[in-house]
Image (spheres, grey):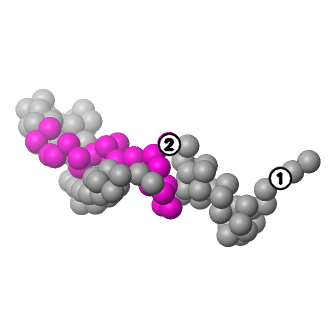
Amino acid sequence: MARLSSINTNNRRKKMAEKFANRRQKLKDIVSNQELSLDERIQATIKLSELPRNSSKTRFRNRCEVSGRPRAFYRKFRMSRIALRELGSLGMIPGLTKSSW
């Protein structure tokens, strides 16, 4: 089990990224628009840099829903390889069977 503080920090980052997503996208559109003047684009860049760092969606990490483990994460199942194998062996995941030969 991952530390609870790490899980909570990650959840806070995810909420903040969702909160600032529209504002961040508008500023990025202004910065990348070549038709606008250089001053407007620079002002947009400054405003973008003043936003909180944790509002960027690259700051949060995919974590296992079961254990909170940050590594070996399967996006399709939203869990780590360890939890996936354990729950798959118990038959808790529909359509997943442990292979043996």
Position above or below: 80 against 37: below
Does the image show residue 10? no
The one nearer the camera, 6 or 47, is 6
Position above or below: 89 against 27: below
Does the image show residue 83? yes
Q: Secondary structure at mark 1?
A: loop
Q: Of all residues shown, which one is farthest toward the top? A: 38
Q: Position of residue 65 (x, y in %)?
A: 48, 61
**Which amino acid type is shown beneath numbered disc 1?**
Ser
**In the rendered structure, does residue 60 fall within the stretch colored magenta?**
yes
Q: Position of residue 72 (x, y in %)?
A: 55, 43
- Quarter of the image for residue 50 reads top left
**Which amino acid type is shown beneath numbered disc 2?**
Arg
Q: Main secondary structure of the magenta part?
A: loop
Q: Which residue is mark 2?
A: 71
- Quarter of the image for residue 85 reads bottom right
Residue 13: mark: none
Label 2 to label 1: alpha-carbon separation: 23 Å
Q: Residues within 10 Å of mark 1 (few under 14, many from 20)?
A: few
Position above or below: 93 against 60: below
Residue drawn at x 10%, y 36% as measured from the top left: 46
Q: Residues within 10 Å of mark 2 (few under 14, many from 20)?
A: few
Q: Secondary structure at mark 2?
A: loop
Q: Is residue 11 left or right of residue 37?
A: right
Looking at the rendering, in which quadrant would you find the N terminus?
A: bottom left
Q: Of all residues shown, which one is farthest toward the right? A: 101
Q: Position of residue 70 (x, y in %)?
A: 45, 46
Q: Which residue is mark 1?
A: 99
Q: Which residues are magenta?
A: 49-71
